[in-house]
Image (cartoon, helix red, strand yellow):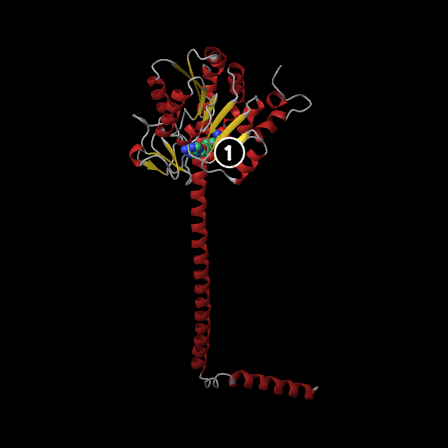
């Protein structure tokens, strides 16, 4: 068996698989999960130079040098300090702080382009058309060719796409549970917006790839690995290794099992997103209720104090009433009465003492 304990577990270590599962992020989204497919790319094409567009944490970049690339140009206009530190640890990784596709012409022609930057029609179409024209023997791997970006543009903010080339967009997100966007969906939280409407022309990553490949006049192949938002592989027919690569990828690209698992994954994840959104709503309701209860407690305390005061006044009136009925003289003015009563009690006690 070739699978490790993190997949199968053992009698001695029955929790190996569970440990591996809980070590993963709740949402797998990095192209690092496509290691096996990249291994096939390197096995079938001579890959020396790589251009990686959209780097984020840099967790994939070293994978290409592990497989033998001598230079990886890591294009990301917004590198974090963590990314700079990660790339600095490997001298074969070169950070390029510019947006694609404009930057492509300034870099060496590569053998492998990995496109995972801005996920919209305009950017992906122009990236792919540039590569097909200027690096026709390169292999192109593209991320996010399936839901949610396949037929709906996503724009990283601030967007570098001209307003006339963008669709009307929203801060809301996609969900698989209905067709409309929702604040309870896959939202960008300020990092990106998405097109309000899905589908139609010039909308989405897969639409861009299909159009670019179609304009290649039947000379280009496109295959899709239907997992983790979809990995597209584009290569020119007749380029050395292309047919063999596509054949080697077939167990993945034709897998209904993978596609079903991906659909199940996005359904479960968007259900989690919806529940998280509802929980925030419930927590807000609970805060509002706690405030109402607190206000009502203060009101109860105030009413209790008013009641005590009314009881006191009532008792005094009762006493006055009883005195009037019994014909006794009125109590001396406030303060003198209790003092006189105390004096009377002391005198009576002394009389009792002297008698004994
Ligand atoms: C989904 S992340 C990349 C993830 C990474 N490829 C991985 O698999 O781990 C997208 C990245 O693209 C970058 N980006 C956005 N617009 C870009 C552009 N026009 N050119 C290059 N990178 C871009 C963003 O800053 C972000 O870091």
Q: Position of residue 161 (x, y in %)?
A: 35, 34
Q: Position of residue 89 (x, y in %)?
A: 59, 33
Q: Position of residue 262 (x, y in %)?
A: 46, 23
**Nearest to the observer: residue 45 or residue 158:** 45
Quadrant in which ligand 1 is drawn: top left
Residue at the (68%, 86%) spot, across then down: 353
Q: Residues within 10 Å of mark 1 (few under 14, many from 20)?
A: many
Q: Position of residue 32 (x, y in %)?
A: 52, 26
Identify residue for label 1.
95
Q: Quadrant of residue 136?
A: top left
- The extreme right residue here reads 356
Q: Quadrant of the C terminus?
A: bottom right
Asked if residue 128 lies left or right of residue 83, the reply is left
Q: Look at the picture and state if 223 lies above or below 56.
A: above
**Nearest to the observer: residue 23 or residue 329:** 23
**Nearest to the observer: residue 266 or residue 38:** 38
Identify the element where label 1 is drawn.
strand
Asked if residue 188 lies left or right of residue 38, the reply is left
Residue at the (65%, 24%) spot, across then down: 14
């Amino acid at each position: 068996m070739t699978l490790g304990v993190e997949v199968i577990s053992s009698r001695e270590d029955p929790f190996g698989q569970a440990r591996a599962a809980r070590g993963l992020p709740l949402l797998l989204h990095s192209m690092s999960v496509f290691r096996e497919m990249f291994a096939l790319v390197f096995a079938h094409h001579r890959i020396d130079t790589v251009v990686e567009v959209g780097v984020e944490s840099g967790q994939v970049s070293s994978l290409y040098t592990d497989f033998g690339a001598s230079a990886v140009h890591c294009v990301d206009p917004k590198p974090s300090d963590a990314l700079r530190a990660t790339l600095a640890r490997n001298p074969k990784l070169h950070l390029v702080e510019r947006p694609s596709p404009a930057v492509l012409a300034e870099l060496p022609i590569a053998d492998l382009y990995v496109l995972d930057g801005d996920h919209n029609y305009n950017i992906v179409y122009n990236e792919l058309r540039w590569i097909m024209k200027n690096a026709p023997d390169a292999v192109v791997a593209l991320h996010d060719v399936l839901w949610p970006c396949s037929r709906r543009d996503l724009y990283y903010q601030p967007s570098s796409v001209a307003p006339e080339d963008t669709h009307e967009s929203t801060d809301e997100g996609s969900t698989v549970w209905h067709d409309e966007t929702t604040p309870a969906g896959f939202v960008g939280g300020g990092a990106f917006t998405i097109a309000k409407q899905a589908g139609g022309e010039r909308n989405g990553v897969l639409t861009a790839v299909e159009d670019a490949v179609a304009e290649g006049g039947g000379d280009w192949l496109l295959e899709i690995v239907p997992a983790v938002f979809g990995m597209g592989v584009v290569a020119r027919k007749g380029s050395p290794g292309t047919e063999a690569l596509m054949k080697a990828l077939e167990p993945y690209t034709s897998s209904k099992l993978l596609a079903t698992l991906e659909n199940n994954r996005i359904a479960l994840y968007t259900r989690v997103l919806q529940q998280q959104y509802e929980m925030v709503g419930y927590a807000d309701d609970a805060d509002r209720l706690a405030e109402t209860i607190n206000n009502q407690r203060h009101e109860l305390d105030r009413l209790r104090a008013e009641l005590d005061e009314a009881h006191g006044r009532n008792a005094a009136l009762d006493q006055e009433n009883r005195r009037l009925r019994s014909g006794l003289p009125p109590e001396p003015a406030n303060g003198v009465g209790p003092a006189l009563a105390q004096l009377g009690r002391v005198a009576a006690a002394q009389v009792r003492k002297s008698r004994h």
